[in-house]
């Protein structure tokens, strides 16, 4: 839904600069607590990942994984930056990496 998306460049920039960061094998996840009603996700998939078809596949996988987290998160902005090798990862690999990264960042932010 629109309210669950990061849409402005400033929101992406703010989350990536001042949010907590957790690198994984295929992604880098940034999380920042914000004053809002719901969690918002943003995805950065550069041309280094591959062709347009490949980049869209990676984005669709990441979006689906993020969708499963929406019910459990509140008042955070999360940016997921896909690394060059993200296209080589299976859906399950990406899911495990993002699940552990988000839970780790949430624990770190709770302190």
Image (spheres, rainbow, N blue to C red):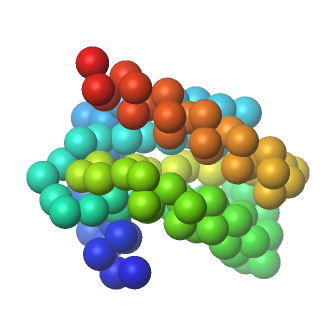
Q: Residue pushed farthest top?
A: 111
Q: x, y (%) of residue 37? A: 19, 63
Residue 57 appears in the rendering: yes
Instruction: Tell me: 49 left or right of 68.
Output: right
Residue 13 appears in the rendering: no
For the C terminus, the image quarter is top left
Q: x, y (%) of residue 52? A: 73, 76
Q: x, y (%) of residue 84? A: 73, 47
Residue 47, by quadrant, is bottom right
Residue in the picture at 73% in, 48% down: 94
Q: Residue pushed farthest left?
A: 35
Q: Is residue 30 above or below residue 46?
A: above
Residue in the picture at 37% in, 51% down: 73
Q: x, y (%) of residue 91? A: 80, 57
Residue 42, by quadrant, is bottom left
For the N terminus, the image quarter is bottom left
Residue in the picture at 24% in, 42% down: 33
Instruction: Tell me: 11 left or right of 67.
Output: left
Q: Is residue 105 above or below residue 83?
A: above
Residue in the picture at 53% in, 66% down: 67
* Front-most of residues 70 and 14: 70
Instruction: Tell me: 102 left or right of 3.
Output: right
Instruction: Tell me: 94 left or right of 37.
Output: right
Exactly how many numbered labels are in the figure? 0
Q: Is residue 4 above or below residue 103?
A: below
């Amino acid at each position: 839904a629109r309210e669950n998306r990061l849409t402005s460049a400033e929101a992406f920039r703010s989350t990536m600069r001042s949010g907590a960061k957790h690198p994984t094998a295929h992604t880098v996840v940034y999380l920042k607590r914000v004053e809002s009603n719901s969690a918002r996700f943003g995805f950065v998939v550069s041309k280094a990942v591959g062709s347009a078809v490949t980049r869209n596949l990676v984005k669709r996988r990441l979006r689906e994984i993020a969708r499963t987290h929406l019910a459990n998160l509140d008042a955070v902005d999360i940016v997921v930056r896909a690394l060059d090798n993200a296209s080589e990862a299976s859906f399950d690999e990406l899911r495990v990496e993002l699940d552990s990264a988000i839970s780790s960042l949430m624990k770190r932010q709770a302190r």
